[in-house]
Image (cartoon, grey):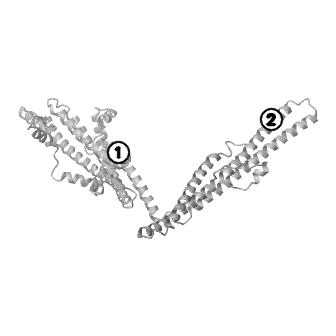
Amino acid sequence: MADSDPIPGDPDQVATLGRQLRRTAEELERQIRNLNAIAEVDSWDSKAGKEFREKATGNVKKLEAALTRYETAADALGDTVTEVGGGHQDKIHAKLTNYATDLNRAQEIADAALREAKDAEDRKGAAQRRLGDSSDKDTADKKKLEEQRDLAGDEIDAARAKITQAKEIRDSAAKKACEALEDLAKINDSLKDDFWDKFDDWIDTIGSLAEAWATYLGVAALAVGWIPIIGQALAGVLGALATILSLVSAISTVIQVLRGDKGLKDLAFAVLGIAMMGVGKAFAKVAGNYVKTALGSMDRAGAAKTAAQVARAKKKMNKVAGSKMKWEMGALRESLGKKMEPFKLEPGDGWKSMKEAVTEPFSPKAWSENLRTLKPGSGNYGAAWGKVVVRGDGNAVLGVGRSLSAADPGVASHLKDVKFATQGLDSYPAVNQISKTATGVSLAGTAVTSVGMGLDGNLNPLLD
C-alpha cells in the first residue's frame, strides 16, 4: 500500500504552534488597546504628551501589522484539531479549514484505508490458499473462491485510491496554509524589510563569514610554517588572506556599530584582535633577529679551530644565550637589562610590526616573493623535501616528525635549523639555552597572534 507512512505529521504539534501564535496575537491586541487608550488622553496636553501620542500612534501601526501576521498564521495552521464526523464520503468532501484539522482528517482517511486493505489482503490470501488446495473440489466452489479473491483485490485497489485521496487533501491543505503565509511576506507595510534591513543582514553575513575564514586560514598558516623553504611562503599567503578577512570583519563591525547593531565592546574586540596580530609579528621579528644572531654564532663556533677562536665563540654564544638573572636588591634592574639585550628591536621595528599587520597583505612584494617561492618547477619543493630527509637522517617520516613546530611561521623552519645546528657543539653549554629561548619567544608570538585571530569571534561571545 505504501513504502512508508503515507500521511506523516503530527496534527497536535501543529495545533500547539498555532496556539502559541494565537496567544501572541492576543497579547498584541491587548497592547494595542492600551496604547490607544493612553493616546486618547487629552489631559496630558504638554510637549511630552504630544510627542508620546505621536510615538504611540506610530507604534500602534506596527503592532497592528504584527497582529495581522500572527492572526493569519494562527488561522492557517489552526490552534485546535477539530474532528470531522460522518463516514468516508463526509470526510472526503468536507471543506478545508486549517492545516492541523485537515491533516488529521487526511490521516484518519488513510488509517481507515490501511485497515480495510489489511483485512482485504488477509481474505485474498486465504481464498488463494484454498484455491491452491481445491483440485478435488467442484467447479461451483472454485468459482466462489475466485470471486472472493477478486473482490478482496478490488477492495485493496479501492483502499489504495482512498490513500491517494487522503494525500490530495493533505497537499491541498498544505498549499492553502503556505499561500496564506507567503501572502504575509508580500505585505508592504511598516514591518516590511527595507533596504537598510537587508543591508544590515548582508553586512552581518559578510562579517561572520570573514571572521570564520580568517580564523581557519590563520590556523592553517601557523600549521605549515615548519616546512623548510616553502613553508614560510605558504604561511605568508595564507596569513595575508587571513589578515585581509580580519580587516573585512573589523570594517563590518564598525558599520554595525554605526548602525546600532553592535556595541563599542564589539568594536574594541575587533580592534584589539588586529592589534594583537601586530604584537605577534613583533614577537616574530624579535625571534627572527635572535635566531639570525644565534645561527651566526653557531656557525663561527662550528668553524673554530684554535683555543682563542673557541674562547671567543663561547663568549659570544654565552652573550646570545643571555646571562643568568640576579635577584639581589640593586642588581635586578641591571640583570634584567642584560637578559633582554638580545631581544631588542631595531629603532622603528615595533611600530613597523604593528603597521605590517594591516599593510603587509597589500604589499605586491610580499605576494610576488611568496608566489615565486611556491611556483612549480622552482626547485624549492625538492629542496624542502631534501632538507626534511636530512633532518630525519635519511628517513622522510622521521624528518617530518622532527620538523613539526607550533612556532611562528616566519621563524619556525629557522628554529629547527638552530636545533640541528646544536649538534656537534656539545662543548658549548649555551647552545641548549639558545634553542630553548628562541623557541620560547616564537611560541609566545604564536600565542599572541592566535588569540588575536580568534578574539572577536570566540572570546567575545563568552563575555556576553
Q: Position of residue 90 (x, y in %)?
A: 78, 51
Q: Position of residue 249 (x, y in %)?
A: 36, 55
Query: Is 339 rendered above or below residue 261?
Result: above
Q: Is residue 137 left or right of residue 321?
A: right
Instruction: Find disc 1 in the rendering and name its residue.
Output: 219
Which residue is most to the front? 43
Classify 10 Å Cα crowding around label 2: few (below 14), some (14-19), many (20 and above): some
Disc 2 on helix, strand or loop? helix
Question: Which of the image's four quarters has the N terminus?
Answer: top right
Query: Is 236 rendered above or below residue 321?
Result: below
Specify whether residue 351 is in view: yes
Specify whether residue 376 is in view: no
Residue drawn at 47 percent across, 67 percent down: 53
Q: Position of residue 331 (x, y in %)?
A: 9, 37
Query: Is 42 rendered above or below residue 113?
Result: below
Q: Amino acid at mark 2?
A: Gly
Q: Which numbered circle lies on residue 125?
A: 2
In the foreground, 106 or 39: 39
